[in-house]
Image (cartoon, rainbow, N blue to C red):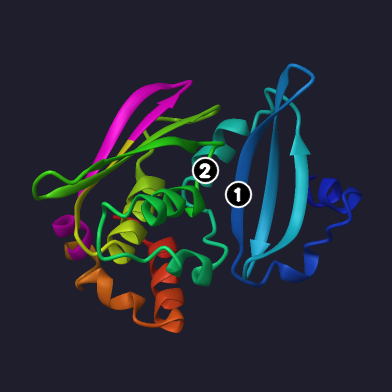
């Protein structure tokens, strides 16, 4: 059924079914109703697009899957915001808005704690469809932040969504314990950083 819907939109993904695919789903508001638009991606290219009506029986499954499947589109763009200091407002703020997000979640403000160590970065986020029980997307974004901002020690995401409000906090120690390496070393070149982003996308602590 999804394949037929996608073909109506000009995307035939039948030739990609034997390749690694990423599934991305987001909620959109149209005519005062919420619908879900779904994407299939292969190597950062969209190969399938279809729209699910409100209350589609697969909506819950789509939202659950979407936390594991989102894409960092441009390693070079993210690398532009590499900084030795969390207090670099411009680079830190731009980095937050350039990360991958899911379920329509977006940062609406960024707070920096630079008075004493461990220095902190807090993203206040909001979005329709945000299930505040799903932490994996924020673990992945924290890993990217720790790799690009040298002196940040704590990364926090305050999430406000229709499932409630919660906060996810990550320390540099727990991220680097998972990846078994100082993640800042992955940003020495774009090629190394691209490999790290693939590892981040595959992570499931």
Q: Earlier in the sequence, mark 1 or mark 2?
A: 1
Label 2: state its secondary structure: loop
User: Residue 71: x percent and y percent?
Assistant: 54, 59
Q: Nearer the viewer, residue 51 or 93?
A: 93
Give the main secondary structure of the magenta stretch: strand
**Which residue, given by chain and number where applicable, does mark 2 sit on?**
102
Image x and y of residue 113, in percent: 20, 42
Q: Which mark identifies residue 24?
A: 1
Relative to 160, is 2 above or below?
A: below
Q: Which quadrant, please, contains the N terminus?
A: top right
Magenta highlight on residue 172:
yes
Mark 2: few/some/many CA within 10 Å (<14, 14-19, 20+): many
Q: Is 179 on the left-hand or right-hand side of 199?
A: left
How far from the left and from the top, in percent, is residue 67?
47, 45
Q: Residue furthest top?
A: 32
In the picture, measured across the screen, residue 105 lies left or right of residue 90, that is right
Is residue 28 located in the magenta-colored stretch of the structure?
Answer: no
For this rendering, which residue is in front, 126 or 110? 110
Q: Is residue 112 left or right of residue 74?
A: left
Q: Which residue is found at the position 25% from the left and 59% from the top?
A: 85
Q: Position of residue 142 (x, y in %)?
A: 32, 53
Label 1 sits on a secondary structure element that is: strand
Which residue appears at 42% of the width and 63% of the height? 81
Residue displayed at 55% across by 67% down: 74
Dividing the image into 4 quarters, which one contains the C terminus? bottom left
Comparing 23 with 140, the one in front is 140
Q: Which mark is residue 1?
A: none
Q: What span is in magenta?
A: 158-176
Residue mark closest to the camera, 1 vs 2: 2
Contact between labelled residues 2 and 1, with CB atoms less than 8 Å apart: yes
């Amino acid at each position: 059924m999804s394949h037929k819907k996608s073909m109506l939109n000009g995307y035939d993904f039948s030739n990609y079914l034997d390749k690694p695919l990423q599934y991305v789903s987001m909620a959109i508001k149209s005519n005062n109703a919420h619908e879900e638009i779904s994407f299939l991606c292969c190597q950062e290219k969209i190969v399938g697009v279809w729209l699910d009506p409100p209350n589609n029986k697969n909506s819950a499954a789509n939202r659950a899957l979407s936390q594991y499947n989102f894409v960092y589109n441009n390693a070079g763009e993210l690398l532009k915001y590499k900084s030795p200091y969390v207090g670099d407002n411009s680079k830190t703020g731009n980095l937050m808005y350039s990360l991958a997000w899911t379920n329509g979640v977006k940062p609406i403000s960024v707070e920096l704690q630079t008075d004493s160590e461990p220095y902190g970065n807090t993203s206040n986020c909001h979005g329709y469809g945000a299930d505040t029980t799903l932490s994996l997307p924020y673990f992945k974004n924290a890993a990217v932040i720790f790799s690009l901002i040298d002196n940040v020690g704590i990364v926090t995401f305050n999430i406000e969504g229709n499932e409630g409000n919660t906060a996810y906090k990550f320390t540099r120690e727990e991220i680097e314990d998972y990846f078994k390496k100082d993640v800042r070393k992955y940003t020495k070149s774009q090629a190394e950083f691209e490999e790290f982003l693939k590892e981040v996308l595959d992570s499931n602590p």
